[in-house]
Amino acid sequence: SAVISQKPSRDICQRGTSLTIQCQVDSQVTMMFWYRQQPGQSLTLIATANQGSEATYESGFVIDKFPISRPNLTFSTLTVSNMSPEDSSIYLCSVVGQGFYGYTFGSGTRLTVV
Amino acid sequence: GIQVEQSPPDLILQEGANSTLRCNFSDSVNNLQWFHQNPWGQLINLFYIPSGTKQNGRLSATTVATERYSLLYISSSQTTDSGVYFCAVSGGGADGLTFGKGTHLIIQP
């Protein structure tokens, strides 16, 4: 399965600022997915990022708040913009590897907004 | 979208006990996975099991796709099995996963 490197692993940010999370995959993948896990909750899909096209956002998530870049088949970034304490969550990227043996997840970015 | 329900929501067991976790889903799926999230937040893929039965050491899983449920069995529990177990499904290859709310498992020594 694909190996995903996600950075940063954790950060503490001031409200009103933005944070960009990076996701690097060791193989080329068509689709990359971004999830949010709020404290004590399950994972929720934010958006699907395809190379060469606009990301597709799930209901309740908008591009102005969570802009996504997908410059090539091995890399993507998610920005959390104009942060508030409610954005404190774990953010994870995910891919489907070759041959489709399921989805693989990065180790996550634990974000705290103060 | 597909709904995923997991039971029980919480489970406390003594070391050495066996357990069964259940996942019900509302529509046909082409992917079903079981994950373990450890206390440090890391999400570990246990099984990719859209149908059939698989075993990996003390863990095994069965999915009955026609009846829309999956079971995860943990035998001879160890304290390191503690954490949250998630079931997640997708209906198509281009879809992201829909997660259940998880089962919070605590194994006491």
Image: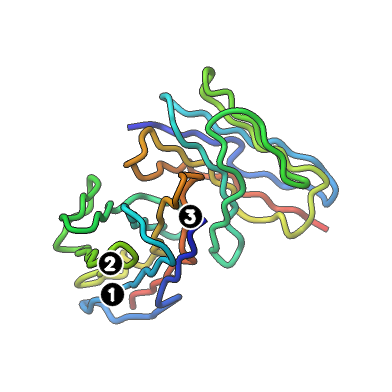
Q: Chain of mark 3?
A: A
The C terminus of chain A lies in quadrant = bottom left
Of circles 3 and 2, the one toward us is 3
Q: Answer few, some or many: residues within 10 Å of disc 2's Cα (few below 14, many 20 plus, some between 14 and 19).
A: many
Q: Amino acid at mark 3?
A: Thr
Q: Position of residue B20 (x, y in %)?
A: 70, 35
Label 1 vs label 2: CA separation? 6 Å
Label 1 vs label 3: CA separation? 21 Å
Q: Residue furthest top?
A: B66
The residue drawn where x is 59% and y is 29% is: B63
Q: Answer few, some or many: residues within 10 Å of disc 3's Cα (few below 14, many 20 plus, some between 14 and 19).
A: some
Q: Amino acid at mark 1?
A: Thr
Q: Which residue is mark 3?
A: A104
Q: Which residue is mark 2?
A: A78
Tag 3's secondary structure?
strand
Label 3 vs label 2: CA separation? 17 Å
Quadrant of res A74: bottom left
Quadrant of res A50: bottom left
The residue drawn where x is 44% and y is 32% is: B30
Work out whether residue A29 or residue B97 is closer to the camera in this orientation and state it: A29
Q: Position of residue B56 (x, y in %)?
A: 72, 45
Q: Which residue is mark 1?
A: A20
On residue B75, the disc is none
